[in-house]
């Protein structure tokens, strides 16, 4: 799918579910920008408020040169499709006053600045609610917007939230340090999804009551919710290591002719099918494989050599397909190139081709995972350059003319 393209145009007449919803986002990096990008995919008009130097995601690596000649980084490029960029300097009184004038025009006000930063500017949730009582306010932070957590003022990136929620320790071996960043931007993306759920619920609540409220998403809470529940297993008396992949059953990657495929076996009938498939039916009833923990214990020494010998003449996709046809859960461990060529990804429009402003092959940005049977896929706008829509947004919402725009620009409140 390409920027501007519409898939399933017969569904387009129905519109998007969030058509008419306006979102004002003071956002940076990934957690909130991914959430608001998803809202934009679903039809919301997302106006991104950036400081004069741009949000910090623009500084990520790798980077390219944007249409305005500025360098712009990967974190920004992947999380800002379909938005408008409005530059306001909130450190200036004129900028804060302008921001306050905008508030009543928006349904959702969102932020993920460092803890306490918005309040320090005089723009805390109480002030926003005073000026826009119907606005749904959403905050993504490491440990909660109310400041009650003992960690409330700690900065947090995804790996910190993941570690503090217990995702890493079950995978630690001996005295070695635990593996860090085991699933990409899990802390950011999961927090974003919970924020979207909260926004939709708060908007629905507003329909009934006419009142806005604060949606408060802590990244640590989100990680506790998506983890395999180490505290729950521990409270049942199970060893904490059971929360680790491959500690209970067979859950590991195995080598094929062109790479690796992953097999996940957690039930007895699946193990029996695997034993027969690789030519070792004697494993069934073998005391070495009496329990699921035993399967895990003997995966590398016994199962791996047999399974990899079986897969030696197969591609990773062929091996996974053959096992799946037997009812064994398996799949190829895909590279970026595999995903770019994958028929499922293409069919589901899960990669969007975004033209590069500096030429070269198009960027491939993740698509919308929420598929609706009555709503068209697309069209998607490209990411905005810094301040690209400042004048247009202020003219549209506040009816500012050339004279006032020039005054604000001269005062440094906008760019």
Image (spheres, helix red, strand yellow):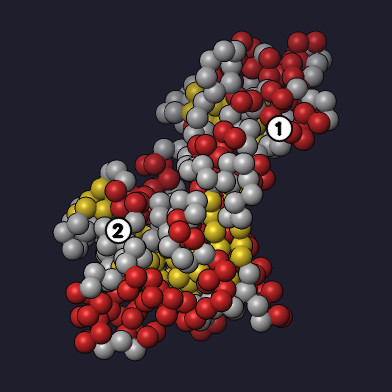
Q: Residues within 10 Å of mark 2 (few under 14, many from 20)?
A: many
Q: Quadrant of residue 208?
A: bottom right
246, above or below 125, in the image: above
In the picture, the quarter occupied by the N terminus is: bottom left
C-alpha span from label 2 to label 1: 39 Å
Above or below 156: residue 279? above
The location of residue 26, given as percent across then percent down, is 43, 63
Residue farthest to the left?
Answer: 69
Task: Give the residue number, with chain letter if any, for mark 1.
Answer: 230
Residue 54's tag is 2
| Residue depicted at x 25% and y 84% | 404
Could you say which quadrant of the image residue 33 lies in? bottom left
**Residue 409 visible within the image:** yes
Which mark is in front, 2 or 1?
2
Q: What numbered label is drawn on residue 302?
A: none
Residue 368: horizontal and vertical position, in percent? 49, 61
Q: Which residue shows up at 68% across the image and 37% down it? A: 228
Q: Secondary structure at mark 1?
A: helix
Which residue is rendered at x = 51% and y = 48% of the image?
A: 188
Q: Position of residue 275 (x, y in %)?
A: 70, 21
Q: Is residue 130 above or below residue 384?
A: below
SS label for mark 2: loop
């Amino acid at each position: 799918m390409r920027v501007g393209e519409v898939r399933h145009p017969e569904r387009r007449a129905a519109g998007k579910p969030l058509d008419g919803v306006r979102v004002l986002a003071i956002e940076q990096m990934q957690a909130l920008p991914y959430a608001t990008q998803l809202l934009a995919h679903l039809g919301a008009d997302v106006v991104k408020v950036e400081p004069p130097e741009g949000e910090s995601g623009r500084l990520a690596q790798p980077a390219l040169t944007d249409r305005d000649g500025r360098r712009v980084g990967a974190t920004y490029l992947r999380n800002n499709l379909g938005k408008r960029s409005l530059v306001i300097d909130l450190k200036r009184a004129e900028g804060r006053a302008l921001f306050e004038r905008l508030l009543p025009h928006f349904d959702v006000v969102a932020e993920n600045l460092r803890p306490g930063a918005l309040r320090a500017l005089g723009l805390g949730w109480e002030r926003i609610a005073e000026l826009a009582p119907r606005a749904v306010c959403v905050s993504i932070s490491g440990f909660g917007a109310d400041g009650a957590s003992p960690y409330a003022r700690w900065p947090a990136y995804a790996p910190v939230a993941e570690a503090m929620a217990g995702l890493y320790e079950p995978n630690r071996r001996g005295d070695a340090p635990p593996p860090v960043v085991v699933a990409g931007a899990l802390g950011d993306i999961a927090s974003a999804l919970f924020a979207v759920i909260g926004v939709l619920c708060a908007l629905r609540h507003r329909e009934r009551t006419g009142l806005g409220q604060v949606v408060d998403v802590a990244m640590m809470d989100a990680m506790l919710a998506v983890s395999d529940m180490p505290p729950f297993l521990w409270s049942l008396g199970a060893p904490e290591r059971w929360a680790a992949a491959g500690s209970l059953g067979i859950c590991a990657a195995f080598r094929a002719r062109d790479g690796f495929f992953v097999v996940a076996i957690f039930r007895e009938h699946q193990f029996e099918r695997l034993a027969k498939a690789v030519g070792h039916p004697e494993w069934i009833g073998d005391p070495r494989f009496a329990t699921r923990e035993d399967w895990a214990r003997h995966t590398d020494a016994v199962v791996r050599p047999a399974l990899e010998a079986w897969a030696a003449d197969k591609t990773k996709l062929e091996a996974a397909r053959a096992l799946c046809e037997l009812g064994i859960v398996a799949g190829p461990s895909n590279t970026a190139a595999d995903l770019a060529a994958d028929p499922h990804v293409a069919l589901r429009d899960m990669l969007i081709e975004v033209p590069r402003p500096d030429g070269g092959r198009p960027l491939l940005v993740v698509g919308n995972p929420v598929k609706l049977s009555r709503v068209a896929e697309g069209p998607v706008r490209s990411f905005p350059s810094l301040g690209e829509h400042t004048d247009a947004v202020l003219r549209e919402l506040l009816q500012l003319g050339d004279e006032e725009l020039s005054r604000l620009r001269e005062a440094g409140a906008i760019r």
